[in-house]
Image (cartoon, rainbow, N blue to C red):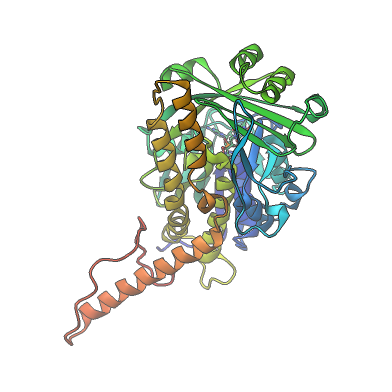
């Protein structure tokens, strides 16, 4: 590519968890001497909204690598006293049926931690210059060509840059600009979530567990946990038979729900859950949507997606926050590799940008596609019928005991995954260069090995990867 620029202008659409983490990662991990990062967020104000969010060890380690130390403190996040990340109890008997455990998490600060989303967001926000965040900028459409990216906002204004990172959530406008036919699928569940002062329930319910609890019932679950900053959360759910389109037009994300409905729905569950629903002061509704894995994460050489925009997994395994943080770290590593201080003759050309985005997506896409496969399988399997309550209960207990092991997700090492991607890209590049040399040679040469073992979607031609 011919063009050379002194400064890499990065635009991030969306200043949620992924957007803020990306800004931090690009400034701290990528260490590009001349980088300008601007974020465009639709919300007119950055308020502490949302309900509870959990981070697994992978997310906690990434927060530490990003330097967001406040979020690792006991004040900001809550880690249960047992050190067990997930405890699964029977809805009626309250018996513990199974647990998840940490396998290789020696530092207790990296144990699964639960936050109010607003507090996690606020901790990230402290590391992003406020003047780089442009509020009230709802992205409507974006374009990209060899020369750059152009964003159009609802208020009629526009912005330009060299790279666009779509961190604009599950209904991403960036994704829609490049994949207009992409559709989300309603999982059939609406979650009823609430966060409130822990003093409303603690000391008021006999034997209220101090650890976070997942109670599983035949059709729905109930979750309760203390959060950081003396908050508490309860989460119930119900089936809604309506279609995605009907849901979208009738329930807004975060819309307030009917607390009596929550209480009625759980009235036959064990006394701890009944007491929790009685003391839960309000509830908000969160219809649950998921989308298929995308065929590519790189559009027009200069645009990529991150967080929920890239993998609409509907919050399965409470992995959304951790995945978004790991995405951001992988992006920072990819940009450091291509543009970082050690790079000689740095050029912010379209080709080098594409190379960085390719390394990022090849690190993250296969990992997140795996979780999306599980999510869609689960949606497809809904609605099993049973001939008796006993049979239903046996199936429930069997389901609880045979939950898939998700350590590959919760203890994922994104730096190791990035190193493996790099190695694979270098091997592909060396192989391609051998083939070129062989075809140019006048000597007879052995047959080149058939195919490559690469599972990457982008083949790199540049041998300097
Ligand atoms: C207000 C809110 C509350 C949430 N509460 C919870 C919760 O309680 N528990 C939980 O597990 N998950 C919650 N989530 C989702 C959770 O944050 C994500 O699943 C995960 O953290 C990945 O983050 P993300 O940054 O990819 O997406 P998000 O956190 O959804 O962030 C996307 C950001 O992009 C902005 N945006 C969207 N469209 C546009 C546009 N067209 N132009 C410009 N900006 C745009 C949004 O306002 C938001 O700030 C919430 C998301 C939001 C936006």
| Rendered-image quadrant of the N terminus | bottom left
- Can you say whether 37 is above or below 222 in the image? below
Residue reaching furthest to the bottom: 443
Ligand 1 falls in quadrant: top right
Where residue 424 sits in the image (x, y, percent)? 40, 67
Q: Is residue 26 visible?
A: yes
Which of the 4 image quarters holds residue 343?
bottom right
Q: Relative to 299, is 138 on the left or the right?
A: right
Instruction: Give the total of numbered labels.
Output: 0
- Can you say whether 424 is above or below 311 in the image? below
Question: What's the residue at 50%, 46% (across, down)?
Answer: 164
Where residue 163 sits in the image (x, y, percent)? 50, 50
Q: Is residue 16 visible?
A: no
Which of the 4 image quarters holds residue 265?
top right
Where residue 196 sits in the image (x, y, percent)? 75, 26
| Rendered-image quadrant of the C terminus | bottom left
Camera-side residue of 268 and 16: 268
Which of the 4 image quarters holds residue 95?
top right
Where residue 385 sits in the image (x, y, percent)? 39, 23
């Amino acid at each position: 590519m011919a063009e050379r620029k002194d400064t890499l202008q990065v635009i991030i659409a969306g200043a949620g968890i992924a957007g803020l983490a990306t800004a931090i990662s690009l400034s701290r991990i990528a260490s590009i001497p001349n980088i300008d990062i601007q974020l465009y967020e639709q919300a007119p104000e950055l308020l502490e909204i949302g309900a509870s969010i959990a981070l697994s060890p992978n997310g906690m380690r990434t927060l530490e690598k990003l330097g967001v130390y406040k979020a690792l403190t006991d004040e900001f996040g809550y880690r249960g006293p047992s050190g067990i990340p997930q405890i699964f109890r029977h809805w009626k008997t309250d018996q513990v049926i199974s647990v998840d455990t940490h396998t290789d998490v020696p530092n207790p600060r990296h144990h699964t931690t639960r936050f109010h989303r607003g507090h996690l967001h606020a901790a990230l926000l402290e590391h992003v210059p406020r003047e780089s965040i442009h509020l009230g900028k709802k992205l409507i459409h974006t374009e990209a060509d060899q020369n750059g990216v152009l964003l159009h906002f609802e208020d009629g204004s526009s912005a330009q840059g060299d790279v666009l990172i779509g961190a604009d959530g599950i209904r991403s406008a960036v994704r829609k600009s490049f994949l207009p036919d992409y559709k989300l699928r309603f999982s059939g569940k609406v979650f009823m979530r609430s966060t409130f002062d822990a003093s409303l329930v603690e000391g008021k319910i006999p034997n209220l567990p101090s650890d976070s609890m997942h109670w599983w019932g035949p059709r729905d679950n109930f979750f309760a946990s203390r959060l950081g900053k003396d908050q508490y959360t309860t989460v119930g759910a119900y089936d809604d038979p309506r279609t995605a389109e009907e849901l979208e037009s009738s329930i807004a994300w975060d819309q307030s729900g009917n607390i009596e409905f929550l209480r009625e729905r759980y009235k036959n569950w064990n006394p701890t859950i009944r007491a929790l629903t009685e003391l839960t002061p309000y509830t908000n509704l969160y219809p649950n949507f998921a989308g298929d894995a995308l065929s590519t994460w790189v559009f027009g050489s200069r645009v990529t997606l991150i967080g929920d925009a890239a993998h609409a997994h509907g919050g399965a395994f409470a992995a959304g926050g951790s995945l978004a943080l790991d995405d951001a770290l992988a992006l920072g590593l990819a940009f450091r590799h291509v543009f970082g201080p050690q790079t000689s003759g740095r050029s912010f050309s379209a080709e080098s940008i594409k190379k960085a985005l390719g390394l990022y997506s090849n690190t993250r896409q296969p990992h997140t596609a795996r979780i999306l496969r599980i999510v869609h399988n689960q949606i497809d399997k809904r609605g099993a019928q049973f001939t008796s309550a006993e049979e239903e209960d046996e199936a429930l207990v069997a389901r609880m005991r045979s939950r898939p092991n998700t350590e590959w997700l919760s203890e994922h090492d994104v730096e190791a995954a990035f190193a493996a991607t790099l190695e694979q890209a270098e091997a592909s590049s060396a192989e391609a260069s051998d083939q070129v040399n062989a075809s140019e040679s006048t000597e007879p040469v052995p047959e080149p090995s058939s195919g490559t073992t690469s599972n990457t979607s982008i083949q790199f031609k540049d041998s300097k990867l």
